[in-house]
Image (spheres, grey):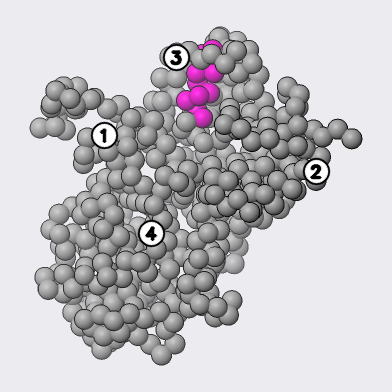
Amino acid sequence: MRWLARLLGGKSGASERRSPAIFLTNTLSGTKELFIPLKQGVVSLYTCGPTVYSRQHIGGLRASIFSDTLARTLAAAGYRVRRVINITDVGHLVGDGDRGQDKMSLGARREETSPAAVAERYAKLFIEDLAELNVDVEDIRFPRATDYIREQIALAKTLEEKGFAYRLPDGLYFDTQKFQNYGKLAGFGEALRAAGARVEVVPGKHSPADFALWRDAKPRDLQQWDSPWGRGNPGWHLECAAMIRALLGPQIDIHTGGEDLASVHHNNEIAESEAATGRPFVRYWMHNAFLNMGGEKISKSLGNEMYLSDIVAKGYSPLALRYFFLQAQYRTPLSFSWDALAGAQEALERLVRLAGEVSVEANGKSLRSAIQSRFLALMRDDLATPQALGLLWETLKSEEYRPEEKLGLLEEAETHLGLSLLSAPAAEAAGAELPRAVENLLARRSAARKIKDFPEADRLRTLIERSGYHVEDSSEGTVLTKQTK
C-alpha cells in the first residue's frame, strides 16, 4: 500500500518522491498524526472565512495566519497547495440555531444598502487585511456562498432523496439521528448536546441537534431564491460542504477554522457531506484556539472586537500582529494587549535589523546547515512556531555559526513564517531606520499593490512622499530614499 511504503521509506511507484514527514494534530482523532495526502504531491486545504456583514476582527485573522503558516509549511515541503477560503454572504444567522436574524440583512439595514453591497465592501477589506499580513491572496480562491446556491440546493436535494432530510412548515431539516456517529469530532460530544439544548425549539424537529438545510423565505428576508421547497435561502452549514465539493472534490486533505466552529458547524458539515457521498469528508481537521482580551475571547457578540485598522492607526506594523500570533502555537489560547503587541513590534524590528546585518556579512550567499534541519523539524511538528522563533533568535545571536549559515536559516524562516525579514524595504543608508508611520504606509501600499488596487497604492505613495521619502519600485522590491531639501 502507498501509505505503508511511504512510512517505511520505500517507493510505491518509480516516479513517486518521498515527502518529508509532517505531523499535525487532528481534531477528529484528538492526536498528532503523520500527514499523508489523498493525492501524491498535492494538498487540498479549506479554511472557514468570515461572514461579511462587518469587518473581520483580529481574532478571526488569527485563524487566517494559522492556515497561511500551515500552507507555507506544506508548500516548502514540496506540496502543491490548493487553497480555498470561503466568503459567507448569505445564510449565517445570529448564533448557531435555525431561527433568528440573518447577519447579512442586519448589515444591509445598518448601512442602508443591499446585502450584496455590504458583502462586497467587507470581503474586499478582509482580503486587503490578509495582504497586509503578508498572505499571498493571489494563490487563494475566495468563493462567495451566493455564487453556489445551485450547488447547495443540489446537495440538499441529494440528502432528501437519501432519507437524511425531512420537511417542516418552515424549511428542510437534516435528520441527525439518521447519520451514524453524528458529532464525531473529538472532544465535542457534550458541547454539541449543550448547543442543541440552547437552540430555540422548532416544532416538529426530530432532535434538538437537527439543523436547517433550507429555510422558507420570511417577509423581511432580503436574499431569496427558488428551490424545490419553495422560495427561501440556504442554511449556513450547507455552503461549506457544497463549495468544497464543487471546488476541491468530495474528499479533501485538511479543513481549518477557529475552535468555536468545531462543535456545531464542522460536525454539521461532516454529516451533510458524508451522508451524501458515503465517503470520509476530511482527512485532517485542524482548529486554532481563541484570541482573548481581558480573559474573554475577542468577538462581536461581546463587543470587544479589535481590527487591523485599529492597530495600524496606533502606529504598529501589520506584521507585528503576525509576529505576535506566531509567538504562540496555534492550539494555545493567546491574550492580546497593547503591551504585548508593542513587545512583538520591537522584537520584529530587532529581528529585521539582525537579518540585514547577517545578509551584508554573508554577502548574500547562504549555506545549508544542521540548524536549518532543526528549524524544519520544528515547523513540521504541528507548526511549533514559538520554538522555531526561539531557535532563530538563538542562532542569529550566536557566534557558533557562519554568516552564510545564518542567512540560510533566515531564508527558511522567511519562507515559513512570512515576516518579510529579508525583504523589508531598503532605506538610503545601510542600517537606517524608517519612522514607524512610514513603515506602516509602505506595508499598506505593498498590500494594495499585491491585490492590484492601484488607486489606493498611488494614494499611499503620495502620503509617503509627503513624509519626506522618494518611492522607487523595481523587480527587486520597493526602495525608499530620503528626499533632500
Q: Do residues under tags 1 and 3 come within 8 Å of each other at their CB atoms?
A: no
Magenta residues, dominant SS class: helix
Left or right, 253 with reference to 421:
left
Q: Could you give the CA–CA distance between mark 2 and mark 4, rounded to whole angstroms?
A: 39 Å
Q: Nearer the viewer, mark 4 or mark 3?
A: 4
Sequence-wise first label, 1 or 3: 1
| Identity, as a three-letter code, of the amino acid under mark 1 | Gly
Dots 4, 3 in contact, CB < 8 A: no
Q: Of marks 3 and 2, which one's residue comes earlier in the chain?
A: 3
Q: Name which residue lies at 60% across and 43% down.
A: 446
Q: Which residue is mark 2?
A: 467
Q: Quadrant of the C terminus?
A: top right
Determine which residue is flagged by label 3. Answer: 368
The answer to whether residue 413 is magenta is yes
> Circle 2 sits in a helix, a strand or a loop, which is it?
loop
Q: Amino acid at mark 4?
A: Pro
* Residue at image point 22% right, 64% down: 272
The mark that comes first in sequence, 1 or 4, is 1
In the shown orientation, is residue 334 left or right of residue 283? Answer: right
**Over which residues does the magenta segment extend?**
404-414
Callout 3 amino acid: Arg
Q: Which residue is mark 1?
A: 41
Q: Residues within 10 Å of mark 4 (few under 14, many from 20)?
A: some
**Which residue matches tag 4?**
143
- Label 4 vs 3, first from the N-terminus: 4
- Image quarter of residue 483: top right
